[in-house]
Image (spheres, rainbow, N blue to C red):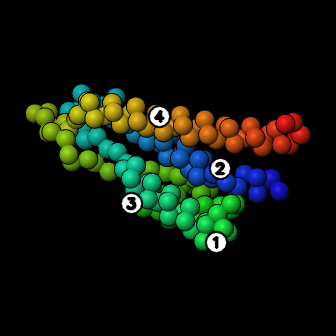
Amino acid sequence: MIKNLATSGSVPALEMMLKFAGARQRVISHNIANFDTPGFQPKDADPKDFQRLLGEAIEGRRAKTGGFSGELDWQESRQVRRGPGGSLRLEPQTDSGNILFHDRNSRDLERTMQDLVENAGVYRVASDLLRSRYRIIQSAIAERV
């Protein structure tokens, strides 16, 4: 029964979003920390690739179980891989859309900060929604209304 509660509704998708946003935040922070490093090439994981992957996993669950409960069976992509124990691991790619500076560093502060803020927003929304789901489950278990 507990497993059904943990895999029902939007919980698996929200958990996957949190994992992706957390891993991407580490990648973006690494890019910012190395902005002045000569020859450093910033990397990033494409959120659209993750959204496609997550959408396919949700559609697969809907087709298999009607969509209400069950694990999300997601397929790896070039940038999103399965880690140990089925965890989510990023393999970010070098973005070639930036200007190459004289020190061979490819950086764009405004775009990087925009990515940082947008990703933090995704993390915040997913964590708030997941917290709300867990509070509902906790209230049901405690028999409170």
Q: Which mark is residue 64?
A: 1
Q: Is residue 39 visible?
A: no
Q: Residues within 10 Å of mark 2 (few under 14, many from 20)?
A: many
Which of the pair 59/103 is nearer the observer?
59
| Residue to which mark 3 is pinned | 78
Mark 1 residue type? Lys
Q: How many marks?
A: 4
Q: Position of residue 115 (x, y in %)?
A: 35, 37
Please state the horizontal and vertical placement of residue 62, each as a whole percent of the image: 61, 66
- The one nearer the camera, 125 or 106, is 125
In this view of the protein, which residue sits in the foreground, 53 or 107? 53
- Picture layout, residue 111 above or below residue 44: above
- Quarter of the picture holding the C terminus: top right
Say which amino acid is labelled 2.
Answer: Val
Label 1 – label 2 distance at C-alpha = 17 Å
Residue depicted at x 80% and y 53%: 2
Amino acid type shown at disc 4: Gly
Task: Estimate the spatial distance between the alpha carbons at disc 3 and disc 2, rounded to whole Å.
Answer: 25 Å
Q: Residue furthest front?
A: 145
Task: Report how far apart the C-alphas of labels 4 and 2 lie in the structure.
Answer: 18 Å
